[in-house]
Amino acid sequence: MSNPFEKRKKVIYEFICDELYVPMKFKEIAMLLQVPKDQRDALREVLESLEAEGKIYLSPKGKYVKGQARHLTGTFQAHAKGFGFVIQEGEAEDIFIPEENTGGAFQGDQVEFIITKQGESREGKRTEGKIVRIISRGFTRVVGLYEKCKNFGFVRPDNQRILQDIYIPEGKDKGAVTGHKVVAELISYGDDKKKPEGKVVEIIGHLNDPGTDIMSIVKGYDLPTTFPERVMNQAERVGKEVSEADMAGRMDLRGWQMVTIDGEDAKDLDDAVSLTKEGENYRLGVHIADVANYVQEGSALDREALKRGTSVYLVDRVIPMLPHSLSNGICSLNAGENRLALSCIMTVNPSGDVIDHTIAETVIRVDERMSYTSVAKILEEQDEAEMQKYETLVPLFERMAELSGILRKRRMQRGSIDFDFPETKMLLDEKGRPVEIMPYERNVATKIIEDFMLLANETVAEEYFWREVPFLYRTHEAPDEEKIKKLSLFINNFGYHIHVRNEVQPKEVQKLLCKVEGTPEEALISRLALRSMKQAKYTPENTGHFGLAARYYTHFTSPIRRYPDLQIHRIIKENLRGRFYEERAEHYRSILPQVALQSSMMERRADEAERETIKLKKVEYMKARIGEEYEGVISGITKWGAYVELPNTIEGLVHVTNMTDDHYIYWEEQYELIGEHTRNVYKLGQTVRVRVIGADKLQRTIDFEIIDDDSDM
């Protein structure tokens, strides 16, 4: 059917140009043109056509304006289904880009775009855009599976957001054969008529070779696998034993009783704790490895550490920020060894308030290297053998548990949010195959260390905020109003409510999590609440930490594995030594914004790589268990099926096409799948028995089918 306004397009444009001396919404234009409601879609088509021609444009507030659209910039995030989003730095809303408007953009590209359709938050409609120019490419290399054809080949990208295979011409395959995982360098990015083209620059190994899967992820995220020779040489030179000269002028705490408490397999021990009681008050010492003493600013070691930003903990390996001769050697607070530290010594009253504190350069000697398991055995199980083995330390651990409880209660009272999702613990065999997967639960010992580190981070952040010197903070902004409103609408379906005034308070989120604890919908609501939050990041400005309900927060406690901690140690040490002149302040003011940005970016990269390796090993674990049956809980309901989570943290999908007993319809309001004929209901939190029917390592997916209907309805 032809558009009745198409022939009048020029007249409409001239009319609009006369009338658009002020920006105007679509409804206002329709009313001025006296367009009946049943013809307004046709008018909108004409306006969109004029917009595409650059004669008018839609403002971010949803008003039509004369002239070319304002060109905005952002980062393109592709979706496996073809569409994508543009993320703008500092903007709350992501811009939806339909498949036909992606303009050939790839995942991670910096793009220029225009707004084509303004969203309506009340109706749940997103703002849409169109990419008009690619400013810079997000990547030049792709990791994937090579497939040989007659005289050419293709690379199927591991990254599901890269939607097209990469064409590899004859002679550009480096000898790769079908089944090889490879790194391909892009020669061209393709267009509507032509696939992207590349050449193989590295063969990682065959798909079935041990270690190839994890190394593909390492290469895919461009994680470094070795240190440059210059960095290694420098690490060897500085990593000498602590000398008398090194200890001169430092507070000597070697007579204090102190321990490290870490996981059994930890090798980089960067924090030790001491605790005594003076009257009714506690004297808590948090002693952190003085890495800055060994890694000088601007050195090869420092430049490499900044480039890496953080250590990366994958399921089968650690990619450290610093060479092992430092991270596991002179910087690690090994028991019985003299070590240089930066200590935050706090006097804490019975209410959990820090009433006095000292930050000092110190020399320490740890009495015992403890594990979380051992301390938990002593405090939770009163294990006789463990208590006898560490007899002299038992009173210390009991004081720690006492103070930890006080600090945790105080944090909860102010509204700190505790997302207590069980992490995944994996045991791999010598070939890297997963043999056991289980939830890694926090115990009393992990909570003690967490509480003490949080307090030290807050104390250091507050002091340096009031000193008004350039500093790096760990900040977490309040969530966007729209996301909280959507969360509020969602939880109303389950009878919950969250108060949203001018802006949501952390205490409101905390109350919600307390209410859903132990309910069938706990996992889903907790995850949705977490997704409503913004990402924490590093910034030179102190804007507080929403999730912790903290006005001041920094990262001070892990300089072996996080660059921001190392950076602020330098500032603290210069201040303690009275060398923080205006020239140094100006130097830090100039470098900290880039350090913050780099650290935040590398942290996100590390998190994504860690998650990918866990997903991969979960799929591999289930691939060896096709046909096995498990009991699980429905953790998510969507129109394409039900997600079921097993007690070991593995989650798989029961696709609606595999629900063969009936045709199931998705009821969005109740988040239920209901059988059209049987009226059988699947809902959140419901216990079901499932059989593993598929596991795809390339797609990182696990498929289940429900095998009985005897679960609680």
Image (cartoon, rainbow, N blue to C red):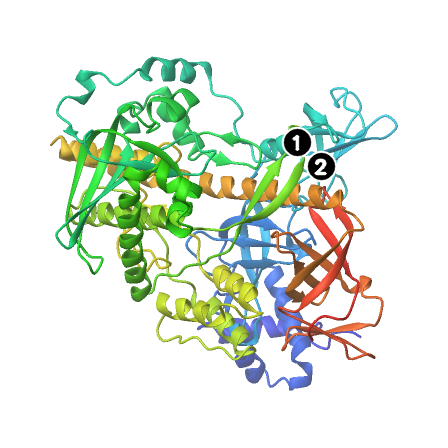
Q: Residue 196 got which mark?
A: 2
Instruction: Please tell me how crowded label 1 is: few (under 14), some (14-19), or many (20+) other residues with Cα within 10 Å.
Output: many
Q: Vertically, is 149 above or below 501? A: above
**Residue, disc 1:** 186
Tell me, yes or no, whether the two marked residues, 1 and 2, touch with CB atoms within 8 Å: yes
Lateral position of residue 325 relative to residue 708, left or right: left
Which quarter of the image is occupied by the C terminus? bottom right
Which quarter of the image is occupied by the N terminus? bottom right
Lateral position of residue 665 relative to residue 372, left or right: right
Q: Which residue is rendered at x = 28% and y = 35% of the image?
A: 288
Q: Relative to the observer, which residue lies in front, 543 or 712?
A: 712
Instruction: Give the quadrant of residue 407.
Output: bottom left
Say whether residue 56 is visible: no
- Check disc 1 and give the amino acid type: Leu
Gap in angstroms between the C-alphas marked 1 and 2: 7 Å
- Check disc 2 and give the amino acid type: Pro
Q: Relative to the observer, which residue lies in front, 636 or 301?
A: 636
Q: How many marks?
A: 2
Disc 1 is placed on an element classified as: strand
Say whether residue 290 is visible: yes
Rendered location of residue 627, percent (x, y): 81, 51
Lateral position of residue 97 relative to residue 181, left or right: left
Rendered location of residue 267, percent (x, y): 43, 29
Rendered location of residue 203, percent (x, y): 69, 24
Pick whichever of labels 1 and 2 is earlier in the sequence. Answer: 1
Instruction: Give the quadrant of residue 311.
Output: top left
Q: Residue 374 got which mark?
A: none
Disc 2 is placed on an element classified as: loop
Q: Which residue is rendered at x = 65% and y = 42% of the image?
A: 616
Q: Which residue is rendered at x = 15% and y = 55% of the image?
A: 280
